[in-house]
Amino acid sequence: MATQSLTQHTFDEVVAGNDVVFVDFWASWCGPCRAFAPTFEASSDKYPDVVFAKVNTETEQGLATAANIRSIPTVMAFREGVLVFTHSGVLPSEAIDDLVAQVKDLDMDEVRRKVAEQATAKK
């Protein structure tokens, strides 16, 4: 499955509407982003049950700001609509393979419990 481009209008729908979503925040002027793109694209072909999406931070500045992107490339992983991983910098294909397995194996009841605890602690 090819990567899909996300915009501010499609981001929430894609993240909430799919079990596992990996998002690459990138820009065309970013050398590491261009170097990482083929690896990310190959992963989308390798894992057809996972959505691999890209956000162009140049054209989607509001979305990049809302996602608190400070450097690119940044990869975020979502499981059942919950952000479960963020990494700034290039990931080798082996790391993506490992990450896909870890995200799929998460106990989402436990993740939601921890998220709720953190939200309560912030109040």
Image: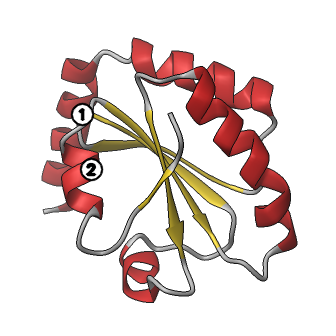
Counting every numbered tag in the picture gives 2
Q: Which color mode does the image show?
A: secondary structure
Q: Is residue 117 above or below residue 57?
A: above
- In the image, taking residue 61 as reference, residue 34 lies left or right, namely right
Residue at the spot 28% in from the left edge and 42% down from the top edge = 82
Q: Please name which of the two marks, 2 or 1, marks the residue nearer to the observer.
A: 2
Q: Residue at x 40, y 22 (%)?
A: 49
The percent position of residue 15, horizontal first and vertical second, equals 28, 48
Residue 33 drawn above or below residue 102? below
Mark on residue 104? none
Q: Which image quadrant: the C terminus?
A: bottom left
Which is more toward the observer, 83 or 100? Answer: 100
Label placed on residue 80: 1
Residue lying at 46% horizontally and 74% vertically, measured from the top left? 68
Q: Position of residue 39 (x, y in %)?
A: 76, 41
- Residue type, label 2: Val
Task: Give the camera-side residue of 24 and 99.
Answer: 24
> Quadrant of the rendered structure where residue 78 is?
top left
Image height of 37 relative to 8, above or below:
above
Residue 51, located in which quarter of the rendered image?
Answer: top left
Looking at marks 2 and 1 on the same chain, the residue that comes earlier in the sequence is marked by 2
- Label 2, label 1: how far apart the Cα atoms are: 10 Å
Image x and y of residue 120, in percent? 13, 50
Which numbered dot is residue 14? 2
- Element at label 2: helix
Question: As drawn, is 85 to the left or to the right of 29?
Answer: left
Q: Secondary structure at mark 1?
A: loop
Identity of the amino acid at label 1?
Answer: Glu
Q: Is residue 111 left or right of residue 30?
A: left
Q: Residue at x 60, y 29 (%)?
A: 45
Where is residue 17 drawn, in percent x and y?
A: 18, 41
